[in-house]
Amino acid sequence: MSMIMRIIGGVLFICILWNRISICVSHKNALLLIPDTFCGISSLILSLALLLGKRDNIVFHFICYLGFIGGLIVVVYPDFIGQASSIFYPDTISGLLHHSIMFYTILIMTITKYFVPTIKKWYALPLGLCCVMTLGIFEITVLDSNDAMQIFNPLLPDTIFTWWFCGILLLVFSYLVMVVFEYFNVWKKQSGSDNIKTETEEKTL
């Protein structure tokens, strides 16, 4: 499974690199090679964590939540698809690919338990978000980015969905996911113990 995940990580890395290079070319700005969006940085970090990290490493406990939400939104509503007349415009197709691969990869990781949500590692998410926002501030102040990580403007224009509001929602959502997983893990262990106990009692009788 580790080899398969590394291959997927490599494919995701190629897609996000293609996307960033396409954006650099279309905007004629090499500094845009560094992702300045939540989804872009999520794809990059997830791909590197898959390529270089082990199963259920601590990075997953931050980036999988951020990447899942970002990927899901684009899979359901790819708002940038109309930026050119053709879907095969490099910025568009590479963006669709890296978002989709990221989303489905996180689903596969969760189903196969390559990533296992747990409350014990919840601290990784707020720490990771702080790092991402620090990168955004760096891009704005040093690299002269217009609005890295949506720091100045809402993720959806004219709505309450600012970076801090979405951050709070993400923290709550991730915690609920962890609680659900913890509950089912405990339930499965108890069911397994009860079955073993019952079988032992039957053999004794």
Image (spheres, helix red, strand yellow):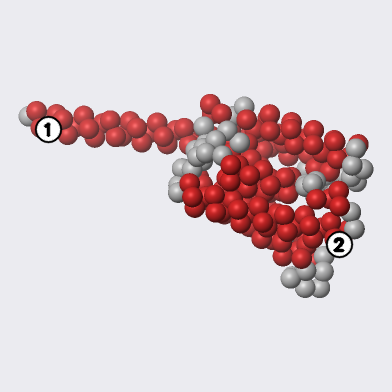
**Residue with the mark numbered 2:** 26
As helix, strand or loop, the secondary structure at mark 2 comes to helix
* The image quarter in which residue 24 lies: bottom right
Q: Name the residue located 86 percent from the left edge and 48 percent from the top edge.
A: 31
Q: Residue at x 85, y 60 (%)?
A: 25
On screen, residue 19 versus residue 202, left or right, reads right
In this rendering, the count of numbered labels is 2
List x then y, in percent, for residue 115: 51, 41
Amino acid bearing label 2: Ser
Mark 1 lies on a secondary structure that is: helix
First of labels 2, 1 by sequence position = 2
* Residue sitting nearer the eye, 195 or 106: 106
The answer, for residue 55, to whether it is visible in the render is yes
The C terminus is located in which quarter?
A: top left
Instruction: Give the spatial CA distance, label 2 vs label 1.
Output: 72 Å
Q: Quadrant of residue 91?
A: bottom right
Callout 2 touching callout 1 (CB < 8 Å): no
* 126 sits to left or right of 82: left
Name the mark nearer the viewer: 2 or 1.
Answer: 2
Q: Which residue is mark 1?
A: 202
Residue 131 locus on image (x, y percent): 74, 32
Q: Residue at x 19, y 32 (%)?
A: 198
Image quarter of residue 191: top left
Judge the density around disc 1: few (<14), some (14-19), many (≥20) Cα neighbours within 10 Å.
few
User: Where residue 102 appears, x then y in whole percent?
Assistant: 62, 52
Task: Name the residue located 73 percent from the left edge and 59 percent from the top edge.
Answer: 18
Q: Residues within 10 Å of mark 2 (few under 14, many from 20)?
A: few
Residue 30 in the figure: left or right of residue 100: right
